[in-house]
Image: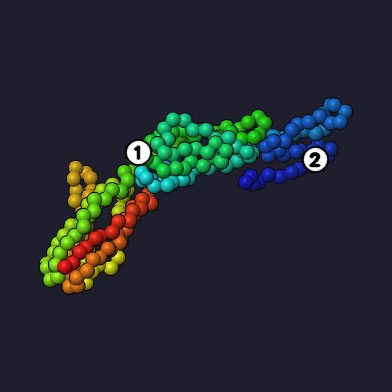
């Protein structure tokens, strides 16, 4: 929004402030009145959003926070090469969304044009990191009542940043243990069942994993106690 604009009338002089899109037309007689002058303030169009976009995770639905300010609707959007595979641009709305299928670092340029005459156009580069999808190896566990156990049920890799692990209620006598393993700069998470089971039965304990880029996966811990 423009602020601080004032309209002054001095004698017979009229000043017209145009906030884009106004025409400097002649009067009905075909000639412009020399007592009237038009002060034109150019409009602007700006692509909004952080130059480095928030991290996302492969395999997760995402919408990039890119928009437009100024200009006159309707807008027309285009994007050059470089979008992550699985992410597309809606040329009418400017929404860039989809499910990325391949991790990596990507750079691309977005352009938007409006309906002003003459047309206003803006271009802006962006970059984004797509982190690998969360992957899980899940092994069913089998144990007996009273047995002292430390059994690994899950091996988890991928995801972005801090990975949070949430579990349901474990069988009586058992707890869940989560440990980290570092391998060539990669962090792998191990999930164990530990303790002494007291009650026979078949159990399916829900495990939920989330990361900092809204990556999300649910996987059960399957336990048989005899």
Residue at 16% in and 60% down: 151
Q: How crowded is mark 2: few (under 14 residues within 10 Å), some or many (20 or more)?
A: few
Residue at 26% in and 48% down: 157
Mark sitting earlier along the chain (1/2): 2
What's the CA distance linking mark 1 and mark 2?
Answer: 65 Å
Rendered image: mark on residue 5: none
Which residue is under mark 1? 102
Which residue is under mark 2? 10
The answer to whether mark 1 and mark 2 are in CB contact below 8 A is no
- Name the residue at the right extreme: 29
Q: Where is residue 26 in the image (x, y as percent from the top left)?
A: 81, 29
Q: Which sits in the foreground, 147 or 55?
A: 147
Element at label 2 = strand
Q: Position of residue 159 (x, y in %)?
A: 31, 48
Which picture quadrant has residue 91? Answer: top right
Left or right, 190 with respect to 35, comes to: left
Residue at 22% in and 69% down: 201
Q: Which sits in the foreground, 114 or 196?
A: 196
Which picture quadrant has residue 14? Answer: top right
* Vertical side of 43 occupied by 193: above or below: below
Residue 82 visible (yes or no): yes
Residue 196 visible (yes or no): no
């Amino acid at each position: 929004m423009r602020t601080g604009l004032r309209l002054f009338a001095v004698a017979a002089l009229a000043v017209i402030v145009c906030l884009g899109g106004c025409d400097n037309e002649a009067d009905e007689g075909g000639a412009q009145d020399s007592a009237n002058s038009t002060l034109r303030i150019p409009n602007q169009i700006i692509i909004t959003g952080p130059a480095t976009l928030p991290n996302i995770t492969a395999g997760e639905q995402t919408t990039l926070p890119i928009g437009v300010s100024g200009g006159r609707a309707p807008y027309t959007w285009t994007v050059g090469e470089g979008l992550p595979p699985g992410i597309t641009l809606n040329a009418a709305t400017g929404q860039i969304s989809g499910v990325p299928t391949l991790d990596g670092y990507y750079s691309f340029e977005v352009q938007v044009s409006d309906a002003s005459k003459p047309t206003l156009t803006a271009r802006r580069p962006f970059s984004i990191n797509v982190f690998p999808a969360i992957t899980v190896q899940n092994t069913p566990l089998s144990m007996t009542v009273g047995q002292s156990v430390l059994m690994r049920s899950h091996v988890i890799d991928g995801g972005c940043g801090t990975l949070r692990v949430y579990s349901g209620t474990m069988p009586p006598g058992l707890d869940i243990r989560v440990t980290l393993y570092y391998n060539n700069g990669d962090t792998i998470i191990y999930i164990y069942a530990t303790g002494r089971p007291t009650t026979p039965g078949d159990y399916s304990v829900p495990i939920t994993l989330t990361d900092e880029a809204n990556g999300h996966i649910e996987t059960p811990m399957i336990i048989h106690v005899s």
